[in-house]
Image: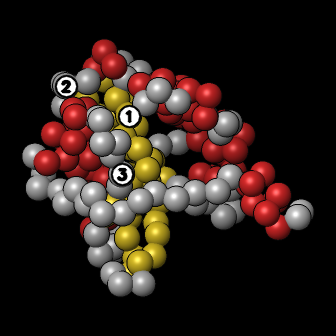
Amino acid sequence: MYTIRKGKIEDLPRVLELVRELAVYEKAPEQVTNTVKMMEEDGFGPNAVFGFFVAIKDSTTEIIGISIYYYRYSTWKGRRLYLEDIVVTESERGNGAGKLLFERTMLKCLEDGCTGMMWQVLDWNKPAINFYQKYGADLDEGWINCNLQADEIKEILGK
């Protein structure tokens, strides 16, 4: 029903559309400030920092889902694959594309010699939580997410 393949630069406009769809679902559409140009540089430039897979509905060329990942380093565990987002367009959810994307991303983790895979899920996103629990994922509630935006950092540092 779906084909999973490595993402290509020409996929990025659709990838960003799906990211925006996810932001609407997560009630934060105004927080998406990424652009196709930024994604081109960050995913395909000389210092690429992320990779992705796409799910294509068979018998079409339509990208209906994405899995975006990058690598992080744990001082305790070593190299880890970080799953930033899995997004399946609303009309295709529940048909197996998310499972295929997740399993392809797990395989990438092993192919690249990572010691494991990590990701986040919103505490109110029960469908996603249930999905990950089917895999026996450890859902750790003991960590608090922290972040600073670039403009905040500039202000703090007086730049």
Q: Secondary structure at mark 2?
A: loop
Q: CA distance from mark 2 to mark 3?
A: 20 Å
Using a 10 Å C-alpha cutoff, classify the residue at mark 2 as few (fewer than 14 neighbours), some (14 to 19) or many (20 or more).
few
- The image shows residue 10 at horizontal and vertical percentages of 58, 35
Q: Is residue 8 visible?
A: yes
Judging by the rendered image, the residue that carries numbered circle 2 is 94
- The image shows residue 19 at horizontal and vertical percentages of 50, 33
Of 137 and 27, nearer the camera is: 27
Earlier along the polypeptide chain: callout 2 or callout 3? 2
- The image shows residue 56 at horizontal and vertical percentages of 35, 29
Of 58 and 115, nearer the camera is: 115
Of 25 and 53, nearer the camera is: 25
The single residue placed furthest to the right in the displayed view is 159
- The image shows residue 77 at horizontal and vertical percentages of 33, 81
Q: Which numbered disc covers residue 131?
A: none
Tell me if label 2 and label 1 are in contact, CB under 8 Å.
no
The single residue placed furthest to the top in the displayed view is 91
Q: CA distance from mark 1 to mark 3?
A: 13 Å
Q: CA distance from mark 2 to mark 1?
A: 12 Å
Judging by the rendered image, the residue that carries numbered circle 1 is 87
Q: Amino acid at mark 1?
A: Val
Tell me if label 2 and label 3 are in contact, CB under 8 Å.
no
Q: Which numbered disc covers residue 120?
A: 3
Q: Is residue 25 above or below residue 81?
A: above
Q: Amino acid at mark 3?
A: Gln
